Image (cartoon, helix red, strand yellow):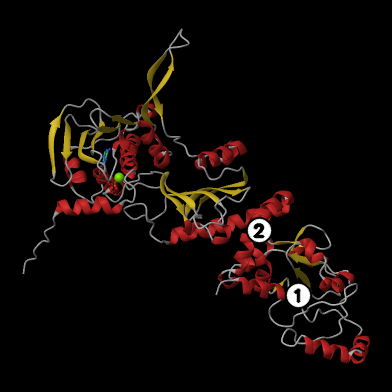
Amino acid sequence: MSKIQFKAESKRLLEMMINSIYTHKEVFLRELISNASDAIDKLYYKALTDDSINFEQENYYIKVVPNKENRTLTITDSGIGMTKEELENNLGTIAKSGSLAFKKENELKDGYDIIGQFGVGFYAAFMVADVVTVVSKALNSDQAYKWESEGAEGYTIEPIEKDSVGTEIILKIKETTEDESYDEYLDEYRLKSIIKKYSDFIRYPIKMDISGRRPKEDSETEFEDYQEEQIINSMVPIWRKNKNELTDEDYQKFYEEKHYGFDKPLKHVHISVDGTIRYNSILYIPEKIPFDFYSKEFEKGLELYSNGVLIMNKCADLLPDYFSFVKGMVDSEDLSLNISREILQHDRQLKLIAKNINKKIKSELVALLRNDREKYEEFYNSFGRQLKYGVYSDYGTHKDELQDLLMFYSSKEGKLVTLDEYVSRMSEEQKYIYYASGESIERIEKLPQTELVSEKGFEILYFTDDIDEFAIRMLMNYKEKEFKSVSSGDLGIEADENETEKDSVEYKDLFDHMKNTLAGKVKDVRVSKRLKTHPVCLATDGELTIEMEKILSMMPD
Ligand code: ADP
Ligand code: MG
């Protein structure tokens, strides 16, 4: 039996496709500019292998021209152009990528950054245009052609005059309706910002005529309008530059330009990895907590570029929650994107990059702690809480990774110390790492429970954050030393047992009376050796300390 071909309502399909792939209409420009850049890349590649073509870098650029009167937006490139067949094949067939074919045909190896591969980007133009006209003259061809389409109904092709090799794409921008404004795609400042946002690192200049107003010559009162051709994109992304050529100011400027934060970054990290997975990344540790950090609106994540083209503003998968304060970007050519380029395939590469970045942040923080204590403490005061949550969360999965980054206020040093520092100061006699929880350092200092430990000369860590004790419970021990709350029943400090026993007998009636009076509130009343100047203190012998119970009882069920 012969197979019958599916019939498809191509008009509906096209509409469905262009309106469902992209979440933002503005990305049509990114797609057309990427195609233009690909076309120049192809010409460049041809020139490398064909001496008859000479490629002068300065002759290759992309130009974007809005025209409000005609409601047109034109994107011109001096790339390789398309023959009549190519116009038919590449633009007349949805999901056919001439660029992918070019890569395969020419067996392009690494270093050629052709972006196209899905064969649908071009149609994004129909999100904003009623009519799309493509005028193109291919390399080594005498005749230029005009391809025109209103999207759904198909297209026409006819010969046309065009002098130079390359392609011109003319969009007839849709009329603004009640629901949707399209006028913005004719506005030079809006266009400029879209180019900056998505295509800043396209390797060829993207030019626009930008208008301005300036004082007339020889006049102080009169002004004139003028237009000036400007290159909109930065072309070479800072992350592809050599670290040695960049100054702290360069990184700081990038931080500001990208609006990563309003503060100055405390530290930046520039990573270039060229192994099984290739990527460049610039990461920042901010100085201050962003104002929305603890709000629901806060979204963690890094900017994600594929080969210089912005794919995602905040890729959350690149950062674990405990490093959610990190800002910055990642650019990789090895990502598998889906056709919208806006949804990543949850792939191995991304996971590898995330793992890599995670390690790097950790080692940078360790280095900061070692080499610039003051800065680290500044960082820790802002984001230490996040690290402690990291230790506690996910059932302690990350505790080994994070424990060396923790700091607590020390009774002995009067400042923040690391667990490693604490343990290295422990005397042989000391069995535990002692800690005391309370609202503030001042409050903890007055706790009767600290007296015996302090008198023994043992250091106590002060826990003033709600999360502290929970995090420590998750750690359980550090370098084989167990943590011990100063309010726990057994402090592991030897007391004079005989004396205690004698007192217990002597005051038995008093204790019984107290126990009866406090029935249901305390389990036992006994003589304590830990008190020096205070008459009484509370101790626990269960799993939870009093502080933890307080916090838990405040939590909603
Ligand atoms: P993709 O870029 O993923 O291949 P597109 O739908 O964006 O898919 O473009 C389809 C094809 O049309 C491209 O692969 C390319 O061969 C051709 N094309 C599009 N724009 C241009 C252009 N400005 N110059 C030359 N060829 C182009
Ligand atoms: Mg494309």
Residue 289 pos. (x, y %) = 61, 51
Query: Is residue 332 something one can see in this rendering?
Result: yes
Q: Quadrant of the C terminus?
A: bottom right
Q: Ligand 2 closer than 8 Å to the CB at disc 2?
A: no
**Location of residue 16 (image quadrant):** bottom left
Residue 424 pos. (x, y %) = 80, 65
**Location of residue 81 (image quadrant):** top left
Q: Give the residue drawn at x 42%, y 41%.
A: 197
- Which of the two residues, 262 or 192, is positioned nearer the viewer here? 262
Badge 2 is on which residue?
A: 384
Could you tell whether 495 is left or right of 211 in the image? right
Kind of residue indicated by mark 1: Lys
**Quick check: which quadrant has ligand 2?**
top left
Q: Give the residue drawn at x 59%, y 55%.
A: 360
- Which of the two residues, 106 or 41, is positioned nearer the viewer here? 41
Query: Is residue 202 something one can see in this rendering?
Result: no
Q: Is residue 2 above or below residue 221?
A: below
Label 1 neighbourhood size at 10 Å, few (<14), some (14-19), many (20+)?
many
Q: Is residue 1 above or below residue 229?
A: below
Badge 1 is on which residue?
A: 484
Q: Quadrant of the N terminus?
A: bottom left
Nearer the N terminus, badge 2 or badge 1?
Answer: 2
